[in-house]
Image: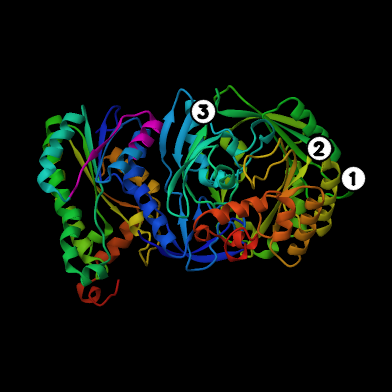
Amino acid sequence: MSWKSLELTGWGRNSHQTALTARPERQKDLQRAIGDSLAQSGLVAHGGLRAYGDQALPRGDDQHALLTTRMNRILAFDSATGIVTVEAGMCFRDMIRAFVPKGWLIPVSPGTAFATMGGAIANDIHGKNHDTQGSFCNHVLGFELITPDGNTQQVTPDHNLFRATIGGCGLTGVITTVTVQLKKISGNCVQVTETKIKDLESYLIAFDEAIAQNVDYTVGWIDGLAKGKRMGRGIFETATLSDETIELKPAKEKSVPIDFPALALNPLSVRSFNLLYRNRFLRKSRTTLTPFEAFNYPLDAISDWNRIYGKRGFHQFQCVIPRSEGERALPLLLDTIARSGAGSFLSVLKTMGGDGRGLLSFPMKGYTLALDFPHKAGVEALFRSLHKITADHGGRIYLAKDSMLTRDEFDAMYPNADEMRQVLASLPHSEKLTSQMAARLALTGDAA
Amino acid sequence: MSIQTKNETWLILGASSSLARAFAAEVAGQGHDVILAGRDQDDMAATATDLTARFDIKATPTAFDAMRMEQHPTFAAAIDAMAAGTLNIFLVFAQMPEQDDIDADPTLVVPTVTATYSGAVSVLHCLAPLLEQRQAGHVVIVGSVAGDRGRIKNYVYGSAKAGLHAYAQGLRARLFKSGIGVTTVKPGFLDTAMTWDAEGMFLVSSPQAAAADINKAVTKGKDVIYTPRFWWVIMTIIKHIPEAIMKKLAF
């Protein structure tokens, strides 16, 4: 098995770590790579490198990192039941392209098609349809896990490592295959309705109505710089699965070829972007048929879009707030963000329908708000205040995005944190599977 | 010459490599059946399941070892029985140890040359009559830019590929009489498991891009291609460096 020293970074490019990396293409090589690194200083498994912070960063340059993206084959597919088993490095784009033409949809998808199935379990990811479909692991029937003692386990919901692995940030083992139940569909697109929303109160009403109507997908874009009476204004999108099949145009690949200079993102440019975005259609609302990929992954159309934040990188704040606290917490969060002047283009508000199945699953019934912030002086203080508002209202921060939670903040938000620590402590050689995030949150290793 | 009609079979020799997998997906995506030949049976089986599930074609794994040349005639007979209709061949296997490792352990020369050259020539020579009988088909032989000029960094592997290029030229002339095309592919640096820890790589391209390039060349009936195409320019320059200068260069 060949290893090479490579600098790794999360999607937010806010921290970096050099590690010995391997990128196996066959089961045999994958197993050898895992065995070799467990026998040495341990490893971290990576999927599409779409976690924003330090979740998948090794703790030191003698640690190994395993890139799984070339392990991406379909191992079994039953066209009668829609049950599919794939290698864990298979990404959502592949799942959509392979199965939508056959009338089967991966029922839950994150905002990027480059995330992998293994990463989707490790973060119990959610999409724009949490109210109706729950999170990814609600559809997972089982997976294969190589635990830190080197043993291969078939994990189904009754297995003692199921709850710890779901949303478990890869700390219980390396996920090598995933079995998931696909959803039967009859078209290849969704019917999207976009409606302009004038303030936060109208937003919450719009979400309530959509949930009452059992709409398949709901998502809201918010102007993170709008203050006072305009706070919370934006565009609300709802979508329903369509029975129609539309012609798919091959996507033109756009990319961000260079790191933007720090100056490019300033309150004025963000304000101008938001103005343009809010007025991208003139009527009060519009309805269109949109293919799954374009609807689910609008940002993937521009590869390396994370470079607009320049070399310094950025952080994404994503919290979930219990539904009963939304009216109080969301204005506080939005006000704190608007006053900081540091908000970015991509502010997203969604609803969630209930708890996930993992010890560290992110979802709960409520509202989830996500925004990007360039990495610069003052951002940490801002995140501390946002974390505090979140925790004070019974909410939590999404570990897939996080790079800044302290152990105390984390413990206040995740009631099962200690149970997770106990599971990991009782897992033989769990110190071999660690990460910078695990150390920061004192989940494994000497700090636990 | 129309070779991309429906219901052809592509025999992929060395089907575990990422370029082979990408090319198999290319042709399976066009509705062709594939036979996946290689040593790692579990891996062949997984790729076969994957291609069948994605493209609703027939994908058959089969055991093949380039080094076991005494078995090649039996292998060819088995292929003859397996594939009805037009048979196309994609040959991609090779062994590329670091030149330093070969220098330190000259016993590595034989496996390198056997896997890269003799094994390839042996199996192609066993398969050529099948294609001639059918008076149809296409052969893709994956060579290397390393075969265009002997270089201090990889001349054992490079000389085997140079030999393979020469063999391909002869085979092309032979099969031309039967209306069968032979395409020699010279990839530049590909991002594969074989080159993962190789140093000094630049302008690296993905196996998928190379596979699409090769498929296009097959459709057009090209004899020799570089992928990506700019490697033709690079190699033309390198081929024209006088030996008196070349011997002093360290690449």
Q: Which mark is first along the chain, 1 or 2? A: 2
Q: Bounds of the magenta span?
A: B47-66
Q: Quadrant of the N terminus of chain A?
A: bottom left
In this view, the mark in front (2 or 1): 2
Q: Is residue A384 above or below residue A319?
A: below
Q: Is residue A357 above or below residue A255?
A: above
Q: Residue at x 44, y 25 (%)?
A: A79
Q: Which mark is first along the chain, 1 or 3? A: 3
Amino acid found under the numbered disc labelled 2: Tyr
Amino acid found under the numbered disc labelled 1: Lys
Q: Which mark is first along the chain, 2 or 3? A: 3
Residue labelled with disc 2:
A203
**Dot 3 alpha-carbon crowd within 10 angstroms: few under 14, some 14 to 19, many 20 or more:** many
Q: Which mark is residue B17?
A: none
- Asked which secondary structure carries label 3, the reply is strand
- Which color mode does the image show? rainbow
**x, y (%) of residue A298?**
62, 42
What's the CA distance linking mark 3 and mark 2?
32 Å
Q: Which mark is residue A104?
A: 3
What's the CA distance linking mark 3 and mark 1?
44 Å
**x, y (%) of residue A83?**
48, 30
Q: Are marks 3 and 2 in contact (CB under 8 Å)?
A: no
Q: Describe residue A391's horizontal placement relative to residue A8 as left or right.
A: right
Question: Which residue of the protein is positioned furthest toward the front in this rendering?
Answer: A426
Query: Is disc 2 on the same chain as disc 3?
Result: yes
Q: Which mark is residue A229?
A: 1
What's the CA distance linking mark 2 and mark 1?
13 Å
**x, y (%) of residue A232?**
82, 44
Q: Residue at x 69, y 39 (%)?
A: A355
Subunit of label 2: A
* In front of the other: A180 or A386: A180
- Asked which secondary structure carries label 2, the reply is helix
